Image: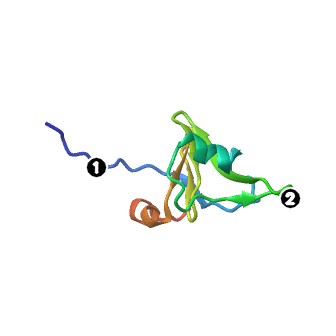
Amino acid sequence: MSKKYERASLIVEAGKYEIGKGMEDGFELYSKVITNGWISHDNLIQHTRPDGTVVCPFIQNRRGLIFLRQGDYIITENDNERHACGEDKFHLRYRAIDE
């Protein structure tokens, strides 16, 4: 039987993703993302480079590549592990703190 757990308090840094700010770890060709079937492409951020190629930004953590979607926040934990959280869930899971 499963037990219930409460998420432990954890202070993180987070920022809403913006293209061109160097927040991502890299880009992958959109065609490769779709062809490999890694993820659903709903709301996936697509950036068209000057040469016409379309790429998708991602961050990388111990679980692999996380492709960013419109409205995602990038969360950096104290150990520099990074995650993405959708805007729809971010404000339910995190609240701003005074420093």
Q: Position of residue 27 (x, y in %)?
A: 71, 47
Residue 40 at least partly seen: yes
Q: Nearer the viewer, mark 2 or mark 1?
A: 2
What x and y, as percent, mark residue 54? 73, 55
Q: Residue 90 bears which disc, if any?
A: none
Q: Amino acid at mark 2?
A: Pro
Instruction: Indicate the position of residue 88 as horizontal and vertical percent values.
Output: 44, 66
- Image quarter (top left, top right, bottom left or bottom right) of the N terminus: top left
Dot 1 alpha-carbon crowd within 10 angstroms: few under 14, some 14 to 19, many 20 or more: few
Q: Residue furthest top?
A: 62
Q: Secondary structure at mark 1?
A: loop
Relative to 18, is 67 above or below? above
The colour scheme applied to this rendered structure is rainbow
Residue depicted at x 52% and y 65% = 98
Look at the image and tell me in which quarter the C terminus lies: bottom right
Q: Earlier in the sequence, mark 2 or mark 1?
A: 1
Q: Determine whether 69 is above or below 24 in the image.
A: below
Residue at which label 1 appears: 6
Q: CA–CA distance between discs 2 and 1?
A: 47 Å
- SS of the residue at dot 2? loop
**Horizontal placement of 3 versus 13: left or right?**
left
User: Left of 78 or right of it: where is 3?
Assistant: left
Q: Which mark is residue 50?
A: 2
Residue at 35% x, 47% y: name it.
8
User: Is residue 80 among the parts visible in the rendering?
Assistant: no
Residue 3 position within the rendered picture, expressed as x and y whole percent measured from the top left: 18, 41
Q: Residues within 10 Å of mark 2 (few under 14, many from 20)?
A: few
